[in-house]
Image (cartoon, rainbow, N blue to C red):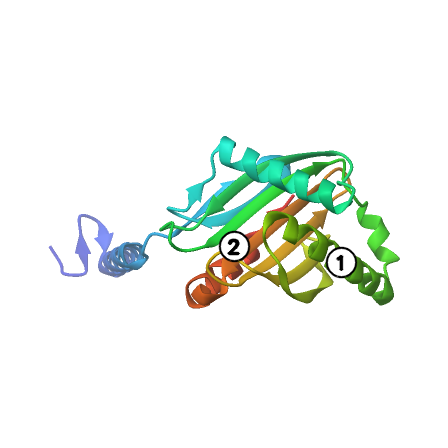
């Protein structure tokens, strides 16, 4: 048998097959190493109703129905006592979760309003002055309602319009008091044609190193279909 042939296969063909086999093995090994080197995420993707999703840290405590009912009851009472009219439509809480351990404080809450409080097309006519006027009214409302639940507005940081998944969103930021120090709050109100979402992100300012990047990741993960 000559060296250039084996079982009727040209030696050049055997070399190509050998090279292909080695390349496939290298790719498989590289993929295995890459998969092994990728640590599991500390965040879980949560898909909620009406097409909204976001990532929430694993291990955060989901508030029970009773706990959410207490919060909703307190909020309703605070608005009524402040003489502020509650939003029209039907509001449903989709998720409410707090950080762990319980000695820390960071939170995320998502509420759904049906129908949408504002149609997205309205934002095409919204001016900078409209946002300033709304900002003044929002700050006034916070100064009235927060004391009704034993809190105070430390600083109103402002309001702006952004886009989330192509939908207009009002972003309100402020600092309020808390049992263990000031709390930073970012409120996102996202408007679609059929419904709107209210997303509340907050953390205790003394724990900013822990929670600011976490809430920024949650914020960047929000998607609406």
Tag on residue 218?
Answer: 2
In this rendering, position of residue 222 left or right of residue 213:
right
Q: Name the residue under label 1.
A: 140
Q: In this view, does 91 lie above or below 13?
A: above
Q: Which residue is drawn at 41% across and 46% down?
A: 60
* Residue 199 locus on image (x, y percent): 61, 49
Give above or below for 47 relative to 3.
above
User: How many dots with numbers?
Assistant: 2
Foreground pick, 84 / 7: 84
Image side of residue 193 versus residue 56, left or right: right
Does dot 1 land on a helix, a strand or a loop?
Answer: helix
The percent position of residue 111, horizontal first and vertical second, equals: 63, 41
Q: Are marks 2 and 1 in contact (CB under 8 Å)?
A: no
Residue at point 76%, 37% (across, down): 194
Quadrant where the C terminus sits is top right
Where 53 falls versus 137 (above or below)? above
Relative to 225, is 170 above or below? Answer: below
């Amino acid at each position: 048998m000559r060296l250039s042939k084996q079982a009727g296969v040209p030696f050049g063909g055997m070399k190509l097959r050998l090279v292909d086999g080695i390349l496939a093995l290298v790719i498989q090994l590289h993929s295995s190493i890459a998969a092994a080197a990728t640590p599991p995420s500390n965040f879980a993707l949560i898909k909620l109703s009406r097409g909204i999703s976001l990532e929430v840290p694993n291990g955060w405590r989901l508030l029970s129905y009773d706990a959410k009912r207490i919060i909703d009851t307190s909020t309703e009472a605070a608005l009524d006592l402040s003489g502020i009219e509650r939003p029209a439509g039907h509001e449903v809480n989709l998720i409410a979760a707090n950080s762990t351990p319980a000695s820390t404080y960071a939170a995320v809450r998502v509420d759904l309003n049906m129908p949408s409080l504002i149609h997205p097309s309205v934002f095409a006519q919204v001016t900078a002055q409209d946002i300033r006027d709304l900002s003044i009214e929002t700050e006034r409302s916070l100064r009235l309602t927060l004391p009704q639940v034993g809190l105070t507005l430390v600083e109103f940081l402002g309001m702006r319009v952004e886009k989330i998944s192509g939908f207009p969103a009002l972003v309100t930021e402020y600092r309020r008091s808390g049992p263990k120090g000031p709390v930073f709050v970012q409120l996102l109100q996202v408007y679609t044609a059929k419904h709107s979402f209210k997303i509340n992100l907050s953390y205790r300012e003394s724990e900013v190193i822990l929670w600011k990047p976490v809430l920024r990741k949650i914020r960047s993960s929000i998607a609406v279909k």
